[in-house]
Amino acid sequence: MSFKSLGLSEPLLRAISKKGYETPSPIQAKAIPPVLEGKDVLASAQTGTGKTAGFTLPLLHNLTKQQSQRHRPIRALILTPTRELAAQVYTNVKEYSEFLDIRSAVIFGGVNQKPQVATIKNGIDVLVATPGRLIDLENQGLLSLKRVEIFVLDEADRMLDMGFLRDIERVMKLIPNKRQNLMFSATFSKDIKKLAYSILNRPVQVEATPENTAVEVIEQKVYRVAKTKKTGLIIKLISEGDWQQVLVFTRTKHGANRLTKKMISAGVTAAAIHGNKSQGARTKALAGFKNGKIRVLVATDIAARGLDIPLLPHVVNFELPNISEDYVHRIGRTGRAGASGEALSLVSADETSYLKNIEKLIAQKIPIEIIEGFEPDPNASTEPIKPGQNRQRNPRRNNKPKGESEGSSSRNSNRNRSRNRNRRRNNDNRN
Ligand code: AMP
């Protein structure tokens, strides 16, 4: 199987070969043909599978079948949940369209809208956007989606987790009924299926290699440890193991900040990356991490989605996620592209049920280790700590429930969904 045999045009093949891709990834091999045929596609694929090229390449091919119009209305809209993912998808669109007469732009919140508006005014064919800024600019009459021919919803599950359902529904009303739809999601809950049903028209369903295959090449370990000793343990592991590039996951933004501060005090260079950080701070943290100036990147699940950090040797779950699929996403950050990696989880008594659910999902028992001096607390309760029970010392800036994880715990609940929306209104800085 080659990109050429998939039927992609010459300028796209040139861009692909410039990127150094030799063969299509499984999701590309499955998704590209139906997209080229103009069909709607519902794809199950997560970051790291090559899904972005899976929709971008045939999208560009389809757009260039027609000569671009002089005024260049927006003909393709790609909606993503986070700024990072939007920026990354946009980079891909630029790279793949290098040899085509296609113009593109990216818009997201948290930064000045002026340069974004100026680019759109010049005329673009492809727009990559996060929902908040997109609706905002449309409301201001600064862009029109009336000529959209292809609509892509990327990381749809994350969109719902972040409370974007209403925004997606609003966007759907702004684009023509007759269009091609592509929807990508790593997981398929009832809500995702409902959304797919409402957006897609007789979609072809494609699936990347099952998510769990990644799990098999990753060395996993659980350290049972007292909650109060986790910070000491992670600093010991990083220092004594001389790990130079570690991605650490916490469940809350506040937890990410606290851990980062403690690491820095202990002499380990670290930065936090989450939704309350400005775009500039996030970009800087990521750049520092990639170029080796920062050893530890402490992230929440949402912030980590869409980050393009290849080949991480170490991923540490400082806290286990309460959604088991998030564990698979997190540890998928190591052992990419066939390289081996290590995924460690620091598990306290209250996370026992999360661990059980994860082991059930991946159909594996994860080996357990206890480090002397960092033993688990035999008297601690195995009841999960509920949102609101977490010991947060600093009051929150906006009225968020204490200890609430960044989005993931609010799945399926109307109350939480509206809370998420309020949160976004108060603090429109995640997109
Ligand atoms: P994605 O899942 O779209 O975030 O892509 C993950 C990574 O795989 C990105 O760094 C891409 O540049 C890379 N990639 C995508 N398609 C291919 C391919 N066919 N061969 C090699 N690398 C690829």
Image (tube, helix red, strand yellow):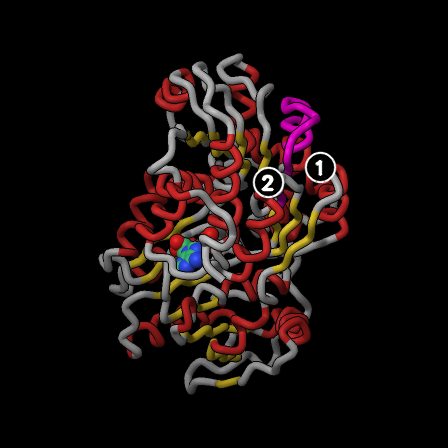
Q: Is residue 354 left or right of residue 330?
A: right
Compared to residue 168, the image places residue 340 above or below, namely below
**Badge 2 element:** strand
Compared to residue 8, the image places residue 326 above or below, namely below
Q: Is residue 391 left or right of residue 335?
A: right
Question: In the rendered image, is residue 306 in sight?
Answer: yes
Which residue is pictured at 66% across the width and 42% down the height? Answer: 39
Amino acid type, label 1: Ile
Question: Front-most of 269 and 198?
Answer: 198
Which residue is pictured at 37% across the width and 41% down the height? Answer: 11
Residue 262 percent coordinates (x, y) = 35, 60
Residue 155 percent coordinates (x, y) = 57, 47
Question: Front-most of 346 and 101?
Answer: 101
Q: Residues within 10 Å of mark 1 (few under 14, many from 20)?
A: many
How many angstroms separate mark 1 from mark 2 (CA)? 10 Å
Q: Is mark 2 within 8 Å of ligand 1?
A: no
Going from N to C along the chain, the mark reached first, 1 or 2, is 2
Give the residue number, with chain letter if any, for mark 1: 199
Magenta segment boundaries in residue numbering: 168-183
